[in-house]
Image (tube, rainbow, N blue to C red):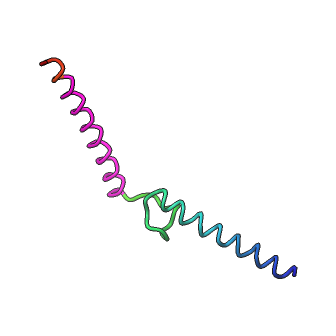
Amino acid sequence: MKKKNALLVFALCILLIIGLWGGINLWKDQPLFSNPRAKASLKHRLKKSTSSVIDHAGDTVEKAGKKLNKILE
């Protein structure tokens, strides 16, 4: 019985480590089994920051357009 319990605890620890590994990668938008401690590539960081800038610029232009419409009415 002790051997079964030890095997169960060992299997749970291994599954926990694999789950954390995959969860961290999914959280960082990386492939599932890549290295979670690796730094994102320059291409990926630039893509992320450019899309953020474009989103904020779009919101700003939309707000400016609404204000302009209020002024012209």
Q: Which residues are magenta?
A: 42-67
Can you tell which quarter of the image residue 70 is in? top left
Given residues 17 and 69, the one toward you in this image is 69
Question: Height in image: 63 above or below 53?
Answer: above
In the rendered image, which quarter contains the C terminus? top left
Point out the residue furthest to the front here. Answer: 73
Looking at the image, residue 34 sits to the left or right of residue 71; the answer is: right
Whether 21 is among the magenta residues is no
Whether residue 50 is situated above or below residue 42 in the rendered picture: above
Where residue 55 sits in the image (x, y, percent)?
29, 42
**48 left or right of 35 in image:** left
- Residue at 12%, 19% (x, y): give it: 72
User: In this image, 5 relative to 52: left or right?
Assistant: right
29 to 18, vertically: above or below: above
Asked if residue 29 lies left or right of residue 36, the reply is: left
Which quadrant of the rendered structure holds the N terminus? bottom right
Number of callouts in the render? 0
Provide residue 17's location: percent of width, then percent of height: 63, 67
Q: Which residue is located at x 42 percent, y 58 percent?
A: 40
